[in-house]
Amino acid sequence: MPTTYTVIRRPLITEKGLGVKETEGTLVFEVAAKATKTEVKQAVEALFKVKVSAVRTATVAGKERRRGKFAGFRPDWKKAYVRLKSGEKMPDYVNNL
């Protein structure tokens, strides 16, 4: 079984991510490409000591990037929307904004 920090790469601190955190009680993370929903759920519960209600995942296709005449693609990556059970305290991982 993978460790917590190999499953969860980092929290996604974007305008949309902070919006769903405030309105829906959902956290957004960049996760490992091969991570399953069950692994993401167990990692978030272990890391933040909260109960998870549901996990949704999405694979984001890498964008094309150019350096002069040379073109390439950024790698694909996976993000997870983790909804906490009602009554759970929202963890504060964005204190420094």
Image: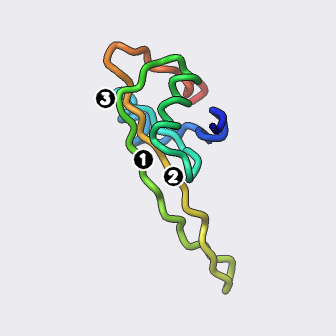
Q: Furthest-front residue in view?
A: 1
Residue 91, how many percent across, how many down? 50, 20
Quadrant assignment, res 53: top left
Residues packed near mark 1 inside 10 Å, few (<14), some (14 to 19) or many (20 plus): some
Q: Which mark is residue 23?
A: 3
The disc, 2 or 3, on the residue closer to the chain's N-terminal end is: 3
The disc, 3 or 1, on the residue closer to the chain's N-terminal end is: 3
Can you say whether 34 is above or below 72 in the image?
A: above
Q: What residue sits right under mark 2 in the picture?
A: 78
The three-letter amino acid code for the residue at tag 3 is: Thr
Q: Disc 1 to disc 2, how far (Cα)?
A: 7 Å
Callout 1–callout 2 Cβ contact below 8 Å:
yes
For label 2, the SS is strand
Residue 73, how many percent across, how many down? 60, 72
Q: What residue sits right under mark 1 in the picture?
A: 57
Q: Disc 3 to disc 1, how far (Cα)?
A: 19 Å
The three-letter amino acid code for the residue at tag 2 is: Lys
The three-letter amino acid code for the residue at tag 1 is: Thr
